Each structure stands twice: as C-alpha cells, then as structure tokens.
Image (tube, rainbow, N blue to C red):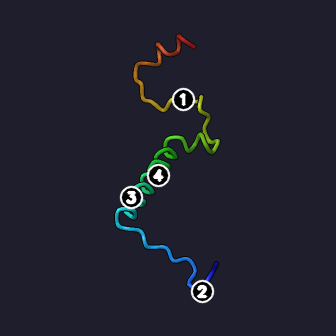
Amino acid sequence: MAGHNGSGFNPHLPGFKHKFLATTLGATMWFFIFWRARKDGAKLLGLKHPWDGHDHDHHGHEAGHSEHH
C-alpha cells in the first residue's frame, strides 16, 4: 500500500563503474554504427548496388578476373 507521505519511487544513483561501463559501451556502439555506415551506407540507402563492385584496389587482377565471368 502506498503511504500518505507521497515519497514515491526513489532509486539510488548509479556508481562510477556503471556510468563508465555505460558510456564505454554506448560509445563503442555508435563507433561501430558509424563505421558500418561508412562501409555500407550507400548500399543501405540504395545509392549503390552490392554487386556493382568490391571497392578493392586490385591492380593487375582484372585480367584474371574477367576470364571467370
């Protein structure tokens, strides 16, 4: 039963370890999202098709590669 004093819910503040861990994991998540967006963002937005190319600089590989297609 709720009392008449109206104190409500009073959670304790998180400790330093929890704040540091939350900040570290959150930053890691956003760095990973931005890294993947840099690599696959154009494909995700439909600006580039996944089969258009590999985005690798293979010099001298084109001659052998064209024989297989």
Residue 54 lies, in percent from the top left, at 51, 29
The mark closer to the camera, 1 or 2, is: 2
Q: CA distance from mark 4 to mark 3?
A: 12 Å
Residue 40 lies, in percent from the top left, at 54, 41
Q: Residues within 10 Å of mark 1 (few under 14, many from 20)?
A: few
Residue 6 tag number = 2
Q: Residue at x 58, y 89 (%)?
A: 5
In which quadrant of the rendered view does residue 20 lie?
A: bottom left
The disc, 1 or 2, on the residue closer to the chain's N-terminal end is 2
Residue 32 lies, in percent from the top left, at 46, 48
The mark closer to the camera, 3 or 1, is: 3
Q: CA distance from mark 4 to mark 1?
A: 28 Å
Q: Which residue is mark 4?
A: 29
The mark closer to the camera, 4 or 3, is: 3
Contact check, label 4 and label 1, Cβ < 8 Å: no
Residue 48 lies, in percent from the top left, at 60, 38
